[in-house]
Amino acid sequence: MAVLNMSLENPVFTCYLTYICILTLKMMLMSILTGMQRKKHQVLASPEDAKLSPGKNFKKSHEDVDRVRRAHLNDLENIPIFMAVGYVYAMTNPSLTTAAMLFRIYTAARCIHTYVYAIHVVPQPARGIAWGIGFLIAGYMAVASICHFAQF
Amino acid sequence: MAVLNMSLENPVFTCYLTYICILTLKMMLMSILTGMQRKKHQVLASPEDAKLSPGKNFKKSHEDVDRVRRAHLNDLENIPIFMAVGYVYAMTNPSLTTAAMLFRIYTAARCIHTYVYAIHVVPQPARGIAWGIGFLIAGYMAVASICHFAQF
Amino acid sequence: MAVLNMSLENPVFTCYLTYICILTLKMMLMSILTGMQRKKHQVLASPEDAKLSPGKNFKKSHEDVDRVRRAHLNDLENIPIFMAVGYVYAMTNPSLTTAAMLFRIYTAARCIHTYVYAIHVVPQPARGIAWGIGFLIAGYMAVASICHFAQF
């Protein structure tokens, strides 16, 4: 039944909606993390911010700030398209068990990616694996959805 | 009634759809603004663009171009996740008054953020406040939605 | 009938869903392309990645890597908001012929943009035209949708 797919009586859809919110909060955390690293290492986001703490010596950049920003950019490259493709995937009538597991693993993989990239640096391939798991899940959802709808 | 939430008879949902379009146009404006600043200060986006205006001396970068790009990147970090979380929030049956007010304030805050960051630079904390208002609204929507659906 | 707009019996909506998935795969390709260029030119994404291939001399940056990243960033600036505004546009009851054509041209334009920007560099205005077509379609969808819903 078509309408069920995106009604709030469809548990796959409400599960999707929950994880969208968790991923949003996770990405918002990156902004706070950036701000904390900027403050710690006295790196300005923009020249006019110097007036907020007069008399200090500001640096142009710092590896820890760049690191958080790289992790944030990687989120921007991956999470918004996952949110979009996850929506489509939730319409394809997957089983709740499969869908919920994919949403959970994706969210965990992205949190681990941020942790090993920007919070406590762990040698590779930790970051590569965390990124790859998220990448494969998004790719699977896209291909499975195209096969399901396929209206070009 | 579940189906109403995302039907076009739900005024909260059509209000959400309207603001999505306004925010899209606002973000598209950033591309135009970047182009204008690039032209004004003769900063190329990519080396092959030099052929479009032969005989000119191009610079590697200029603070005004970087400024617009920072504002644009800040939009990319904030607005797409707001669009996603706003969708979820619109499903939680909020009152039209509250929802419309949040969408309006968010959109205004983001426009002010761009204005004080990239068009007419205003000393801090103007930009910080504009960013913070948008941040708090997105955070509120995420938390309120998780409490409403909470299916992990 | 309002509910039809976003039901899976609406061919405009399933067509939209299909193109979302294609655009997602297209953007995911940018990550792979970046990785390939990084490997080819031995440019690290982050210092700790040096341990993955010990004994090599790594460079700080390379024009081919930067080029793919610029193309990727341009995708991030354009495609997520197109996905959002395309959703709204699909709700406005457009004819299937028009909507499918717009989705198709947009997707083709973005693929051409990536090709002439990051794969086989073609002199301007090739990239400008490809970008402009996508930009105009997104702008048209936003304005047409605002006129249709207009609930501020």
Image: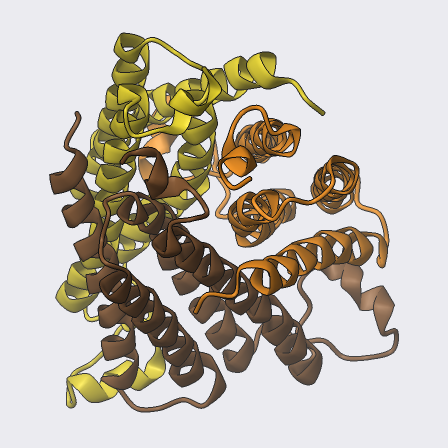
Chain colours: A brown, B orange, C yellow
Q: Quadrant of the N terminus of chain B?
A: top right
Q: Quadrant of residue B22?
A: top right
Q: Is residue A69 left or right of residue B131?
A: left
Q: Is residue A67 left or right of residue A129?
A: right
Front position in the image: B87 or A56: B87
Report whether residue A86 is seen. Answer: yes
Front position in the image: B6 or A81: B6
In the rendered image of this protein, does residue A108 appear above or below residue B90?
A: below
Front position in the image: A25 or A120: A25
Report whether residue B39 is seen. Answer: no
Q: Quadrant of residue C56?
A: bottom left
How far across and down, in percent of the image, does residue B94 sit? 69, 45
How far across and down, in percent of the image, does residue A148 sit? 15, 40
Q: Quadrant of residue B91?
A: top right
Q: Find the residue positioned furthest to the front.
A: B1
How far across and down, in percent of the image, does residue B43 sit? 50, 39
In the rendered image of this protein, does residue A128 appear above or below residue A149?
A: below
- Residue occupying the point 65% across, 75% down: A38
In the rendered image of this protein, does residue A52 appear above or below residue C54?
A: above
- Residue occupying the point 79% across, 37% down: B97
* Number of numbered discs overlaid on the protein picture: 0
- Residue occupying the point 80% across, 67% down: A50
Q: Quadrant of the C terminus of chain B?
A: bottom left
- Residue occupying the point 70% across, 39% down: B103
Q: Is residue B62 left or right of residue A134?
A: right
How far across and down, in percent of the image, does residue C125 sit? 31, 21
